[in-house]
Image (cartoon, rainbow, N blue to C red):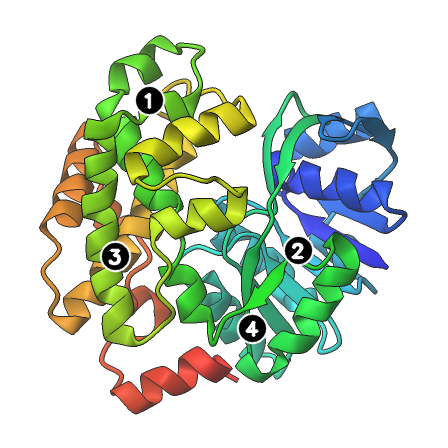
Amino acid sequence: MIVAILGAGSVALANACWLAKEGHIVRIWSALDEERKELKIAGRLTYDGIATGTVKVEVADDAHSCIANADVVMIAAPAFAHDELIAAAAPHISNEQLVVFHPVTGLSSLLLSKALSARGVKAVIADLSTSLFTTRRDGFSSVRILKIKDQIDIATLPAARAQRAAATLAGLFGDRFRIEANVLAISLNNHNPIYHVGPMLCNLSRVEREEDSIYWDWITPGVSRLVRLLDDERLKVVRHYGTNEVTVDDYFREAHGVKADSLAAIFPAVSRKLGGPIGPHGLNHRFVLEDVPFGLVFFWSLGQAAGIDMPSTQSVIQLTSSIWERDFVNEGRTMQRLGLHGLGREEFDRVIAHGFA
């Protein structure tokens, strides 16, 4: 199978290495000139961790040559890069291709659906609830793969094509995909903002000092209570919109196979099981720059539309905006930006099920 990967960060490289290792033809393209240059100079990708080796992949000069004739197009990049990658990819995607957001954040699939609809293209778009791999990039062409997750939720636009998309991905990565009812369920059950933002806020001195300590060890029982507050508010939004409810506790039990009775016990168990990753070094990190505007703001915006009070979420958004000197609400993935503002419930549900086609 031919797989086109847009992005060259840790998730993109882990997928490229895994797929090439399994014998698939992999093309990779980055919107960043430096990344493309360094990948071409290296000529190969190296990986270690749960598997070790070196693989050959094609490094494309542009999005068009990367996507052309690919069976699967994977957008594997943080959400703050999605707009740029959607703009680069949308003119070249065809009806026959499966496009995968890996992982999705804040209904990025709807933005691609709108762009494809303008061309009359009806490609299947799949959203994954989390990245398949727990991984860390070591340089431009090397990646450490700590784990491939046991279970990943998937939904598609249109929703009726989810079974076929899950079968395609199972052929690439094994039988680990659970079908959700719609793409909203995937984005609302994105747990990264829940367990990234609060712990990073509570450990800013470690972040700024660039301490080499395991991230999960930062989440003490007190910090886990902040994680719980944020998750409880997210779950209110989930219940209002009638999507499948997955608590942050259940996410760790399912994705990582962790056996623990409480949230406070889950994080030490994850640390023991994974032995990493190291916590963020510096404030310029996706745990805030992605997870606040495209995660917490997304949850809060849907909650606002539903009349749900979310004081902890709003406080964390305001606090990070002040510390980072950014307006994360204005930058974020809101109902208005997604084209959902002002829709009645019937029309809202139709767009969530079918996209803008």
Q: Quadrant of residue 55?
A: top right
Amino acid tagged 4: Thr
Front one among 255 and 98: 255
Tell me, yes or no, if residue 32 can be seen here. Answer: no
**Could you say where residue 245 lies in the image, as x and y percent from the top left?**
35, 64
- Which of pointers 4 and 2 lies earlier in the amino acid sequence? 2
Q: CA distance from mark 4 to mark 2?
A: 14 Å
How far is the residue under mark 1 from the one under mark 2? 32 Å
Callout 1 amino acid: Trp
163 or 80: nearer the viewer: 163
At 12% from the left edge and 65% from the top edge, which residue is drawn?
308
Residue placed under numbered mark 3 in the picture: 234
Mark 4, mark 3: which one is toward the viewer? Answer: 3
Q: Can you identify the residue that label 4 sits on?
A: 156
Say which of 148 and 47 sits in front: 148
Residue 25 image position (x, y, % from top left): 87, 50
How many labels, in total? 4
The residue carrying pointer 3 sits among few (fewer than 14), some (14 to 19) or many (20 or more) residues within 10 Å by Cα, namely: many
What is the secondary structure assignment of the residue under circle 4?
A: strand
CB under 8 Å between callouts 1 and 3?
no
Q: Mark 1 against mark 2, which lies toward the viewer?
A: 1
